[in-house]
Amino acid sequence: MRLGAIEVAGVGKEFGAATVLNEIDLAIEGGSFVTLLGPSGCGKTTLLRLIAGFLEPSRGAIAIDGAAMQGVPPRRRPIGMVFQNLALFPHLDVFDNVAYGLKVRGAPAGDIAGRVARFLGLVGLAGFERRRIGQLSGGQKQRVALARSLVLEPAILLLDEPLSALDLQLRRQLQVELKSIQRQLATTFVFVTHDQEEATLLSDIIVVMDGGRVQQVGTPGEIYSRPASPFVARFVGDINMLPGRIVSIDAASAEIDVGGSRLRLPLAAVVGKARAGASCDVACRPESVIIQPSSGADTGASFEARVAVLHRLGPMLKVGFDTVHGPLTGLMMANAPAAGLAENQPVQLSIAARSFTVFAQA
């Protein structure tokens, strides 16, 4: 069993009359890369600070590797932290910044030199030992902060939006490096971000939060393909939402009417309590929209549409369509048949039945 397992049980947090976290239950497996994803103010950073010990829960409990953390100060927990504000020491060089925690713990000088060299090599800064902090780029400073936390070999590393201040290209590069480092060390990483693409790229597991609650926990593929609520569907990637009605239900499937098109979907595709006659929201991702009738048994829904707007995104084409059921967005390769599209052009759209998620309305 790997170290770094975290158990959050019934945790709530209030600041005065404001409830920031409400009944959080979460199990994080040791050695995994878990991202807390959500909009600003959803409670993700508060949850991170509770795990770190900078805050105490108003109720509930947090355990690390089976040991209760109530009353345990941050310095006694097996964690490291990397913040957006890196808090490096400008008067110390790279070596002494990374070595600082080891020196505070009284590690032997020989051990310090070896461990600093190892972790500077791991983050790609071998040979930078005597550089001053002011001589480093933003990405290099981020690597120093990461090495400074990892050199203490914590079971858990908590990262609070550490890449958000970097430009896009550098951020993408460091995301790849960060995931590689995590896999090499098998340390539990708990990463906070509001960037859906970042969460998808980095994570083994994503925890989607909103309004102080956990909305869904799953792999990136599960979160994207089978969102548990309209909020998750809209927050993680682009989504089309069409009004529909549940026509009938049996033990294995549900028949859905979408603007006159009848869909027979597995009952597992329906989120919420399905009942015949109820209104619903029928969701599908833009890449599932195809310009021509699909072939085979999974014909799904077919719509007449008109091209409203075209946006070129590198090799992809993002197309806005007007239909009698409402607007639809498609995302497709910018080649045939999409290459010949023009605004106001009438087209026939099809969406495979397997691409739909249905959110039953109460």
Image: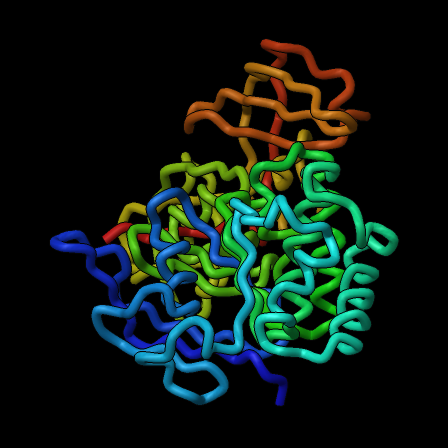
Residue at figure coordinates x 58%, y 53% from the top left: 354
| Above/below status of 145 relative to 75 | above
Give coordinates of residue 324: x percent, y percent.
Answer: 43, 23
The quarter holding residue 290 reads: top right
Q: How is the image coloured?
A: rainbow
The single residue placed furthest to the right in the displayed view is 127
Residue 322 shows in this picture: yes
Viewed as shown, does residue 106 lie left or right of 283? Answer: right
Residue at image x 54%, y 57%? 159
Where residue 91 appears, as percent x and y from the top left, is: 63, 46
Please state which of residues 321 and 203 is positioned toward the viewer in this rendering: 203
Look at the image and tell me in which quarter the N terminus lies.
bottom right
Q: Is residue 213 above or below residue 8?
A: above
Query: Which of the 4 quarters of the picture holds residue 286?
Result: top right
Q: Where's residue 331, x and y in %?
A: 65, 32
Rendered residue at 56%/79% (across/down): 4
Q: Is residue 197 above or below residue 129?
A: above
| Residue 174 pos. (x, y %) | 72, 47
Q: Is residue 352 visible?
A: no
Viewer-proximal residue among 141 and 166 = 141
- Taking the image as shown, residue 82 lies to the left or right of residue 184, namely left
| Residue sitting at x 70%, y 25% | 313
**Residue at the extreme left of the image, as rendered:** 17
**Who is closer to the viewer here, 14 or 255?**
14
How many numbered discs? 0
